[in-house]
Image (cartoon, rainbow, N blue to C red):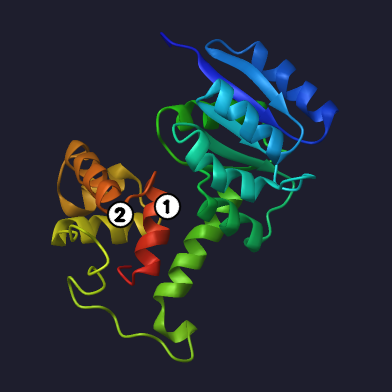
Amino acid sequence: MSENISILLVDDQTLFREGLYTILSVQPGLVVVGEAANGQEALTQAQALQPQVILMDLRMPVLDGVAATRQLRTVAPQSRVIVLTTFDEDEYVFEGLRAGAVGYLLKDVASDKLVEAIRAAARGETFLQPSVAAKVVAEFNRLSNPSAHPAPKPTPRPGAGQNALVEPLSERELEILRLVATGASNREIANSLFISEGTVKNHLTSILGKLEARDRTQAVIKARDLGLV
């Protein structure tokens, strides 16, 4: 890679941060530029350093990882947060993603997967550990399944629920967004709709802009809240 990826480590366990630093410092193109022991320190460091990727623990003193991730949208909007935690309960997963995290990994993740997630985040992509991704897809499927709710809302007509958007999504964009909500990759979406991957990426860029979302996971969460998926 022609440019190093700057990383901020945020965890209240000094030994764990030291271990991360050791693992990441030997990886080509990765540079740890700072460390923080709690969410408040993370905000200060992030504002000063503007790292590309932040590895964020969830449970920390002073300010937890969810609150810190939410506030990072203001102090370091270009930084991409990957949650790195021991907790995989649904409430933590969805709180972390709603706060703005683009990745969610457990601390027992293999080092090569961690590096892969960092590089993906730096490219503007989302990276979820398989067990976490399964929870996200299952939740979206549950919410979109009328039989899972005692009083389901009717399926919105094309264009319904879009009044909150400055610019409504097109029919094609809605199709793509609903496939994204099932966990489909760009290639799978392209094959399903008989279009090129480049066209899918162009539509996704437009979708993110209209929904004011940072990534596809955030787009689906917001679209679900609007009743679009």
Q: CA distance from mark 1 to mark 2?
A: 9 Å
Residue 32 location in percent, x, y?
63, 17
Quarter of the image where one finds residue 174: bottom left
Q: Which residue is mark 1?
A: 218
214 is higher (above) or lower (below) than 122: below
The mark closer to the camera, 1 or 2, is 2
Element marked by disc 1: helix
Q: Which residue is mark 2?
A: 211
Q: Residue at x 65, y 57 (%)?
A: 92
Element marked by disc 2: helix
In this rendering, does residue 113 appear at all? no
Residue 80 versus residue 185: which sits nearer the camera? Answer: 80
Q: Are marks 1 and 2 in contact (CB under 8 Å)?
A: yes
Residue 57 is labelled as none
Quadrant where the C terminus lies? bottom left
Question: Badge 1 local density, few (<14 within 10 Å), some, or many (20+)?
Answer: many
Residue 149 location in percent, x, y?
48, 85
Q: Hey, what amino acid is under mark 1?
A: Gln
Residue 106 location in percent, x, y?
68, 43
Q: Hey, what amino acid is under mark 2?
A: Leu
Q: Residue at x 69, y 38 (%)?
A: 40
Quadrant where the N terminus lies? top left
